[in-house]
Image: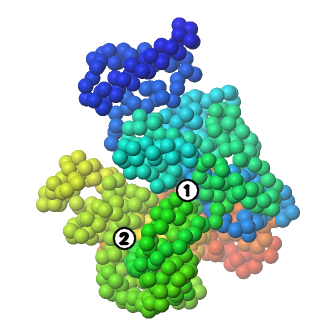
Amino acid sequence: MTEVEAKQRLKLLYMEIRAADDQYYNADAPVLSDAEYDALRQEMLALEAEFPHLVTANSPSQSVGVKPSGKFGKITHAVPMLSLDNAFTDDDVTDFVARVKRFLNLPDDTVIEFTSEPKIDGLSAALRYENGVLVSGATRGDGQVGEDVTANLRTLETVPKTLKGTGWPDVLEVRGEVYIDHLDFETMNQAQQAAGKDVYKNPRNAAAGSLRQIDPSITAKRPLKLFAYAWGELSAPISETQFGAIERLAEWGFSTNPETRLHSNAADIIQHYTEISEKRANLGYDIDGVVYKVNDLELQERLGFVSRAPRWAIAHKFPAEKAITLLKDIEIQVGRTGALTPVAKLDPITVGGVVVSNATLHNEDEINRLGVKPGDRVEIQRAGDVIPQVLRIVEDSGNAPFDFPTHCPVCGAEARNDVDEKTGRIDVVKRCTNGVRCPAQATESLIHFVSRRAFDIDGMGTKQIEGFYDKGLVLEPADIFTLESRNESIGLERWEGWGETSARNLFDAINARRNIEFHRFLYGLGIRHIGQGNANLLARHYLSWDKFFDAVISIGEADSFAWTELMSIDGVGPGQAGSVRDYFADPANRQLVQNLLAQVNVIDAEAPSGDSPVAGKTVVFTGKLEKFSRDEAKAKAQSLGAKVSGSVSGKTDYLIAGPGAGSKLKKAESLGVKVLSEDEWLAFID
Ligand code: IVH
C-alpha cells in the first residue's frame, strides 16, 4: 500500500471506529459485532505501525477504547517536579542574581547568563519518551507522585506522539505547561453555556478541568496546548545550556515559548520584565510573571535545590490586581495549630478574573493597623495563587472597632499569644490553648493528616473528615484506621452519597496506608513548624521512629543531650526544636501517637547510601572556605548523604576547617575528631 492509500484508508477507519465507539459508549446500541470492531482496530493499528507519521492526535488509537477507569493511576516522577521561589520587586531580582553568585563563590562582577521566559498560568505536565515514542504523561501532583493522564495528554496536538528529527536521548522526559488560550477559552465557555453547563472561571481552571477528564475523548475536544520549558529524567544530556536545551526541544517537535530570551545581568532582566508586562494583555494567553533561569546547566547542577525549589531559577511575579468592595463581617477561623485567623467576609467581587468573597486579615495586629471593621468599604488585592488580602479602608463606616476575641470561638478555651523561642518577643498570633481537644484544631489536624503530602488517603478530604467527626466516628487519626472494623454498626455504604463501591474504595485506600514512611507519618501529625522539608530532615537524621520518639520525649532541660542533638541538625532551629519538644510534652498528643501506632507501621527512613565515603557521616564546616561558599559545600555534602551539623560533638566524624577556624577546631582536636582542610575534603569526596 502506498502512503497516500494508507492515509485514505486510515481516514475511513478512523471514521468507522469513532462512529462505533460513539454508539457503544453513548447510545448503548452497538452497530458492529465485537469481532467486526476488533478487525477494524487491528487493521488501523497495523497501518499505524507501518506509517507512524500518519498517526494524528485524534486517532482512536490515541484516545477512546480506553474504558473510563473512574480514577487515574499514579506515576512516580523519576526526578521530582519542583516549584519556583517568587520575586515581587526589582530588588528581589537583584538579590537573586547576587545570591547565585555568592553561592557559587564568584566575585560580584562575574557575568552569569540567565534565560527568561513567560510564566504560563496553566498546570504542569511531564511527558516521558522512550526511544522517541511517547510512553506516559503525568500531572505534577505533589511533585513526587502525579496522576497518569497519558491518554488525555496524547490528545493534545502540541504533544508529539513521536519525536521529530534526530539526536534525542533514549529516555527523555519533557516538562511543560498545559494551558488554554484566550480565544479558545471564550469559544469553549460559549459552548458550555449553550449546553446549559457551568462556565469556567478562568483559562487555568478550564485547562485543569479539561486535562483531568476521565474520558479522554472529552479532553480531545478541549483546546488544550502545551509549552515545553523543562525536563526531568534524561538518559544523556541534551545541551550545555538552558537556552540550547529549549532549542533542541523545539527541533524535536515541541512548542516552546517565542518570548524566551537570554540576558547577562539583573538590569537587562528587569528591563525585559517591563517589556513583557506591557505585552502581557496581547500575548493571547494568561501569564502571571516571568521565569529567570541560570543558563549554564553545569552551574544549575552546582546550585541544586533548596527544599522544593531550585536555587538557579526564580519567578518574577506581576503585581497583584486590586478592587474595592464592602467588608460585611469579620469571621475568626481556627486552624490546625490553634491560630485564630480573622477572615474578611466580602461582598463578592471579581479580581483578575476570579470571584473573591473572602480575604485574610492575618491577625489582631493587622486589624488594628488597618482599623477595619464590618461596614467599611475596603480595597483588596489578589496576587496569583496567594490568598486575597485587605489593603486599606476606602470609606469608613464609623462603626465601633472590631473586638478581637480573647477565647477560641469554637471551643471557648482561652486564646493566648505565644512567646517566640528565638527572639523572646510576644507573637502576633493568638492561639487556642486547647490543642486537639478543640474541635476546630482536631478537624483541621485530621484534614492535614489525610492530605496529599501526609498520609495521602484517596477519597478522604475535608467533607468526609467533617462528616465523620460530627458524627463522633473519627475524632483522632487512629479512628480512621478502625472505621472498617466498626462498619457493621456504621453502615457507610448506606449513607447518602456512598455505596458499596465507594465505601470499599475508601477502606482499601485507608488500608493501603497502614505502612507509612517516617517522614509522612511525622508531617501528618501536623506539628507546628514541621513542614514537609523539616519532617524529611528529621527522618533522615533519626532514621527510625522509635529512636526519634525516645529522643524527643527525653527532652527535659534545655541543655539535655536530646535537645542538643535535635538543635545540631542543620536546618533545625529553636523554633522547630521547641515545637517538637512542646508537642510531645503534651500527654494528649503522646496518647494520640500511641493510638495511631497501634494501627500503622512506620517504615524506617533509608540510611544514606551510595559509594561516597561520607554517606551517613556527620560533618561540620568551620572557618573560611576558599573554593566554594559555605552553602555550596554544605549542599554538596548533603547530596552525598552526609549529615551536616552546626556544632562539634562526639558524634562528629569530620571537621572541615578553613583559615580562621577557632573554637570548633579546638574542640574537634580535643575530641579526636578527624580534621580536614578544604582541599583534603575535596580529594576525599571526589
Ligand atoms: S520551570 C524546577 N518555567 O510555574 C523549575 N515553570 O511556580 C520547574 N511554570 O510548577 C519549573 N511557566 O507549573 C518553569 N516557563 C516556566 C513556567 C513554569 C509556568 C509553572 C510550573 C511550575 C510553577 C512553579
Q: Is residue 237 left or right of residue 544?
A: right
Q: Residue at x 19, y 48 (%)?
A: 500
Comparing marks 1 and 2, which lies closer to the viewer? 2
Q: CA distance from mark 1 to mark 2?
A: 34 Å
Find disc 2 in the rendering and name its residue.
Answer: 444
Picture layout, residue 547 above or below residue 587:
above
Pick the front one: 118 or 623: 118
- For disc 1, the neighbor class at 10 Å (few under 14, some 14 to 19, many from 20) is many
Q: Is residue 186 visible?
A: yes
Q: Residue furthest right?
A: 109
Q: Quadrant of residue 608?
A: bottom right
Between 331 and 569, the residue placed more toward the observer is 331
Q: Up-down: is 315 above or below 172?
A: below
Residue 342 locus on image (x, y percent): 44, 80
Residue ID for mark 1? 608
The secondary structure type at the circle numbered 1 is: loop
Residue 629: tell me if it is visible: no
Q: Residues within 10 Å of mark 2 (few under 14, many from 20)?
A: many
Question: Residue 507, how many percent across, how many down?
Answer: 26, 53
Q: Position of residue 410 (x, y in %)?
A: 32, 81
- In the depicted view, which residue is nearer to us: 533 or 625? 533
